[in-house]
Amino acid sequence: MLPPRLRNRRKHYRLTSDEIIPDLQACVLCEDVRQEASGQQTLVGIIGMIPAPVMPIGFFKLCLWSRWCGGVGEFVQQSLILTPDDDEPIAQSEVRFTLPSLEAHATNVHVFGGIQFQKHGLYTVEVKVDNELRLRFPLPVVPVQGQAQP
C-alpha cells in the first residue's frame, strides 16, 4: 500500500505489484564528473550550449549526471543525444539501477565517449526510464566567430 503522501498522486505512477516509477530529481550535461575523497561528486564544465567555431566539433567525452528518487523497484535509464532532425542518436547509453524504498535515491552517470557534432543546429538530449520519456531538453550547437590573435 502507498504511503498517505503518495495516495493522491497515484495517477503519476505506473504501478505493478511492488513498483513505483521514480521521479527524475535532476539531470545535468557536463564535461566530467569527479568522485571526491569524501564520496561527493563534482560536476565539471556544465554544458547549456556548445559554441562551435568550426564543424564538425568533437568531444573526447561528455557526461550526463542524473538523480532519481521517490520510486521503488529495478529500472533501466536510457539516455540519448539526438541529431537536429531527431532521426538518429549520435550517442546513447543505458544504466540499470535499483531503488529499494521510497526514501532511497540513485545517482547515475552516463559517459558518452568520442562524440562528434557534424553540423550546427538544435540537438536534443532525452532521458527515459524503462523506455518511458521522462525528460527532453535542447542542446544548441551554435556558430561563433574565431577569436582574433593579437
Image (cartoon, rainbow, N blue to C red):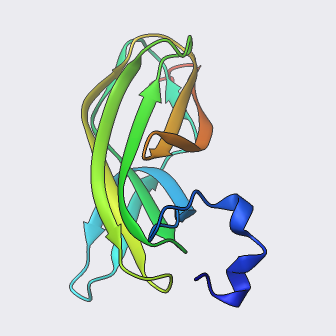
In this view, which residue lies farthest toward the right? Answer: 8
Q: Is residue 33 above or below residue 57?
A: below
Residue 53 location (% of width, % of height) = 48, 19
Determine if residue 55 is in view.
Answer: yes
Image side of residue 150 versus residue 114, left or right: right
Image side of residue 148 versus residue 113, left or right: right
Q: Residue at x 70, y 67 (%)?
A: 10
The residue lying toward the viewer, choosing from 20 and 123, is 20
Residue 44 sits in which quadrant?
A: bottom left
Q: Is residue 45 above or below residue 21?
A: above
Image side of residue 18 versus residue 14, left or right: left
Q: Is residue 142 above or below residue 21?
A: above
Q: Residue at x 28, y 51 (%)?
A: 95
Residue 111 location (% of width, % of height) = 27, 46
Q: Residue at x 31, y 49 (%)?
A: 110
The residue lying toward the viewer, choosing from 120 and 72, is 72
The quadrant of the picture occupied by the N terminus is: bottom right
Determine if residue 143 is in view.
Answer: no
Residue 59 location (% of width, % of height) = 30, 32
Q: Residue at x 57, y 19 (%)?
A: 145
